[in-house]
Amino acid sequence: MYKLLLISGLISIISFNGMSQRAVEDSIIGTPWVSVQYGLNFTAGDLKENHGFFNHIGLFAGYKTDKNWIYGLDASYMFGADVRATGLFDHLVDSKGNITDQNGDIATVQVQSRGMYTNLSVGKVLPVLSPNPNSGLYLSFGAGFLAHKLRVETQEHVVPELELDYKKGYDRLSQGVNISQFVGYAYMANQGFVNFYAGFYIQEGFTYNRREIFFDTPNTPVSKDMMLDIQYGIKLAWLIPVYQRKPKEFYFN
């Protein structure tokens, strides 16, 4: 999170130096496109068996051409607390319904959703209902890599069966190819820092289980079939365009 804020702050300083020199309202401009983005995503397909709601936070770094085409790299960290997998630790629970640590104390075990994706993206801004030719309907498509898993935490307790590599027997790590689609609105202000895009986002992951055994079901072979992992929701982004300065005019008597 701190790295994202630092990067966006540095880009803002660079952007400010050229802010007064832009002419967004007059013509379509070619400019670097960088954004800090946040997504609210629901799950569907095979993904919803283990994971519920996901938050996405990440960056987009690319370039908008003077034809309003946008090319770049889209990457986000995924996190959530809506875990739907059940019975993961039933075999570790004692007769009183507790999991104990190595000292015999009652342990607190938490499971959360984690993941990431990175896509190469191509998009187009169509100047519809826009204040200038650089704003309007924004459509994009991406393709890349997706990974997600269950994060097992024992807090300050040490539970030998849930430490180090033993966590891998419960984390359901899955990885594979990912594609995404976005439709929304992009706004580049004639003046000021109010630059953003927002809209509906959906991605489809074609993933595979990467573990050879699940410790909670050791006698059941781990499926190696392809899974369809769907996420859909809203994406919001603060757009930080970096403008080039116009050449200064000099007059001689």
Image (cartoon, rainbow, N blue to C red):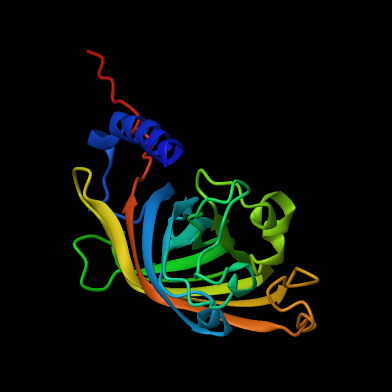
Q: Is residue 127 left or right of residue 99?
A: left
Q: Is residue 124 left or right of residue 214?
A: left
Q: Which residue is drawn at 44% across and 75% down?
A: 52
Q: How many discs appear?
A: 0
- Residue 36 spot, x, y in % from top left: 38, 50
> Picture quarter containing residue 186?
bottom left
- Residue 55 spot, x, y in % from top left: 40, 63
Q: In this view, does 30 lie to the left or right of 22?
A: right
Quarter holding the N terminus? Answer: top left
Q: Nearer the viewer, residue 57 or 18?
A: 57
| Above or below, comparing residue 29 to residue 199 in the picture | above
| Above or below, comparing residue 84 to residue 30 in the picture | below
- Residue 182: tell me if it is visible: yes
Q: Is residue 41 left or right of residue 18?
A: right
- Residue 26: tell me if it is visible: no
| Above or below, comparing residue 168 to residue 85 in the picture | above
View extreme (top): residue: 253
Q: Which residue is drawn at 67% across and 71% down?
A: 177
Q: Which of 184 and 21 is in front in this view?
A: 184
Quarter holding the C terminus? Answer: top left
- Residue 125 spot, x, y in % from top left: 38, 67
Q: Which residue is drawn at 55% across and 61% down?
A: 99
Q: Which residue is drawn at 19% across and 43% down?
A: 192
| Above or below, comparing residue 67 to residue 1 in the picture | below
